[in-house]
């Protein structure tokens, strides 16, 4: 059996220089915000950047970046809307806020279809917002998003989040994906990081702390994507990205 | 929905002056079936999308699995719908005869 989408997926990926997967084991640790602001920083630094939201059950990239434009349908596929220079693709562009119940094999089909359909065009970076856990979306992303790639792990200092991150790192490495490092999000002001030691135990590089930023809640989806770049969150994230070798 | 006539015509054009020149190309249409994993009912794709808005059908056209977001089972009302047949276009088999 030959699936015509395989050729299309390969053609799309040949136009992408680097794929940055943003993951972590737990929900609610700020992966989507890290992915979205990383995309904005890459675009601001002059890189052609795309953001692919693969959190099929809880997509939030459109809300974070305030995207309201519909994607354009062209003969080459779906051209995602752009915000602050970032081309943003999310399943939410197609389901428009409705819930999406999907079982395992269907998730793989959706991931493959979205990768095949989306005409990002040439990109320096495709940032991929992964859902929590080590399920179908992660496995499908690893299977279909091949090329030069690496993963950024986002966690809080919570032992539950660290435990889930440890599992994610193990699976990512098993899938042949380089782990660029671990970022601690929502860090308490002035707190010494337990994440640094935990990252060392996982054999991963500790990239730094991002302090809890109260300002963010009031800004997300309300003040325009560009405003996110001037937050403390963005400043601390930039330092972490630079430590990971991401040129922002 | 795939235009089978157009597909046959394009395959004919593409195969001309190629390795496939003179090949017999068989196109079979598989009926799309949607299954509700909650109650086991199986319905046709047409029945499943009946009554949906054009833009909803358009989304399903792009990614058929999105049917579970827009439609409900006609029998039990659950959204636990899955495409079990008739999805996409696939090359099922290639038979080479008398090749060197």
Image: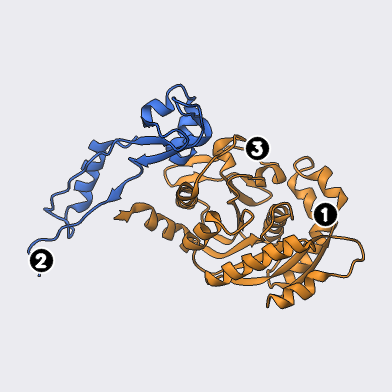
Chain colours: A orange, B blue
Q: Residue at x 78, y 40 (%)?
A: A222
Determine which quarter of the picture holds residue A10: bottom left
Q: Which residue is mark 2?
A: B99
Across and down, in percent, residue A226 comes to 76, 49
Q: Quadrant of the C terminus of chain A?
A: bottom right
Q: Which mark is residue A173?
A: none
| Mark with earlier residue (3, 1) | 3
Q: Secondary structure at mark 1?
A: helix
- Estimate the x, y position of residue A187 in percent, counting from the top left: 84, 61
Residue under numbered circle 1: A230
**Residue corresponding to mark 3:** A68
The residue lying furthest to the right in this view is: A190
- Give whichever of A122, B52 is nearer the camera: B52
Marks 3 and 1 on same chain: yes
- Say what secondary structure mark 3 lies in: loop
> Along the line of sight, which residue is nearer the eye, A208 or B79?
B79
Q: Quadrant of residue A19?
A: bottom right
Marked residue chain, label 1: A
Q: Residue furthest front?
A: B39
Residue farthest along the left direction in this orientation: B98
Percent position (x, y) of residue A92? 59, 40
Note whether residue A26 is visible. Answer: yes
Q: Chain of mark 2?
A: B
Quadrant in the picture for the N terminus of chain A = bottom left
Contact check, label 2 and label 1, Cβ < 8 Å: no
Circles 2 and 1 on the same chain: no
Label 2: few (<14), some or many (≥20) within 10 Å?
few
Find residue B5 and report its horizontal and vertical position in percent: 23, 36
- Residue situated furthest top in the rendering: B51
Q: How many marks?
A: 3
* Residue at the image position 82 percent from the left and 45 percent from the top: A217
């Amino acid at each position: 059996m030959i699936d015509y989408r395989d050729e299309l997926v390969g053609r799309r990926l040949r136009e992408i220089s680097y794929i940055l997967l943003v993951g972590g084991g737990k929900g609610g640790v700020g992966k989507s915000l890290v992915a979205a602001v990383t995309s904005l920083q890459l675009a601001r630094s002059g890189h052609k950047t795309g953001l692919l939201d693969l959190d099929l059950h809880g997509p939030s990239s459109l809300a974070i970046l305030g995207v309201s434009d519909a994607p354009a349908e062209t003969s080459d596929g779906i051209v995602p809307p752009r915000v602050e220079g970032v081309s943003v693709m999310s399943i939410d562009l197609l389901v428009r806020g409705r819930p999406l119940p999907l079982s395992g094999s269907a998730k793989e089909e959706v991931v493959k279809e979205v990768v095949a359909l989306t005409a990002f065009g040439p990109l320096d970076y495709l940032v991929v917002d992964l859902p929590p856990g080590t399920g179908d979306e992660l496995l499908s992303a690893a299977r279909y998003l091949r090329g030069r790639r690496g993963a950024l792990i986002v966690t809080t200092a919570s032992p539950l989040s660290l435990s889930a991150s440890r599992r994610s790192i193990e699976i990512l490495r098993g899938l042949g994906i380089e782990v660029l490092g671990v970022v601690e999000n929502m860090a308490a002001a002035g707190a010494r990081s337990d994440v640094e030691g935990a990252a060392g135990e996982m054999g991963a590089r500790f990239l730094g702390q991002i302090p809890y930023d109260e300002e963010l809640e009031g800004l997300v989806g309300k003040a325009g994507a560009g405003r996110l770049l001037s937050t403390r969150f963005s400043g601390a994230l930039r330092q972490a990205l630079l430590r990971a070798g991401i040129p922002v | 929905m795939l235009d089978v006539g157009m597909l046959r015509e394009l395959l004919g054009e593409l195969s001309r002056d190629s390795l496939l020149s003179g090949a017999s190309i068989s196109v079979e249409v598989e009926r799309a079936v949607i299954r509700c994993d909650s109650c086991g009912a199986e319905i046709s794709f047409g029945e499943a999308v009946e009554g949906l808005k054009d833009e909803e059908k358009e989304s399903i056209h792009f990614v058929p699995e999105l049917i579970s977001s827009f439609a409900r089972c006609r029998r039990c009302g659950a959204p636990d719908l899955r495409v079990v047949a008739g999805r996409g276009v696939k090359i099922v088999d290639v038979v080479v005869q008398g090749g060197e």
